[in-house]
Amino acid sequence: MEEWITLVMSDYGYFGIFFLILLENIFPPIPSEVVLTVGGFMTTTTTMTIPGVIAASTAGSVSGAMMLYGVGLLVDVKRLEKIIDKYGNWLRVKKEDIHKADSWFDRFGVWTVFFGRLVPLVRSLISIPAGMSNMKVWIFITFTTLGTLLWNTVLVFVGEAVGDNRQQIMRQLSLYSNAVYVLIALSVIAAVWYYIRKTRSSNE
């Protein structure tokens, strides 16, 4: 995959970076860590500059985030309520659960969006609940841009600094990503266990 990423950047420059990061936001298995570190390294071998790579990658990331935010707007709370009316008993989900989640996101969503942009996998998917909660567009764009800018800047500078020796950095980033995935999986399991236990207690 790294060879393909490098080829796209070599052929299309900043637009290639924009496209790859846009795609990464919609299709998370494409790792932004690779795209950004390769982009940083290529500032030492091509006419591309660090500010240019950061700007192109940030624009691509925010554009992709806005697409998923739009998906969240389409699947808003009212639509979820209709789904629960049909399948709530089977899914064991109540309207109150949706309203609680929505209220929580209304209260903490701004910082969730910002810090979520620094977490693998979550950084893409966080845009959907932001749309579902009808977070104001300008707030979403602002905190998405800030979080994305921080993430992109760090990795582009890392790629520029380590150059051809970035494989060791990539291994460290891979460990970080895997640790995050394990924590997410454990959190999901814990949430499911808690919900089942709570449901059983209420039925007794």
Image: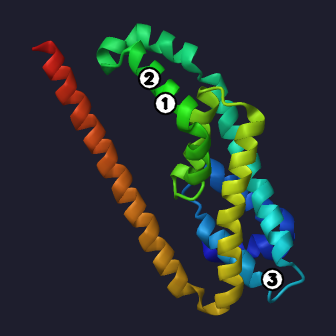
For residue 43, the mark is: 3
Circle 1 or circle 3, nearest the eye: 1
Q: Residues within 10 Å of mark 1 (few under 14, many from 20)?
A: few
* Residue occupying image coordinates x 83% and y 63%: 55
* Residue occupying image coordinates x 86% and y 78%: 49
Q: Position of residue 171 (x, y in %)?
A: 47, 80
| Amino acid found under the numbered disc labelled 2 | Lys
Indicate the secondary structure of the residue bearing disc 3. Answer: loop
For residue 104, the mark is: 1
Snapshot quadrant of residue 53: bottom right
Q: Position of residue 38 (x, y in %)?
A: 69, 78
Q: Is residue 153 left or right of residue 2?
A: right
Q: State the residue lying farthest toward the left.
A: 204
Question: What residue did someone put label 2 on?
Answer: 100
For the residue pair 35 and 190, the one nearer the viewer reads as 190
Residue 66: tell me if it is visible: no
Indicate the secondary structure of the residue bearing disc 1. Answer: helix
| Amino acid found under the numbered disc labelled 1 | Trp
Q: Are marks 1 and 2 in contact (CB under 8 Å)?
A: yes
Residue 138, placed above or below residue 202: below
Q: State the residue lying farthest toward the top.
A: 85
For the residue pair 80 and 101, the one nearer the viewer reads as 101
Indicate the secondary structure of the residue bearing disc 2. Answer: helix
Q: Residues within 10 Å of mark 3 (few under 14, many from 20)?
A: many
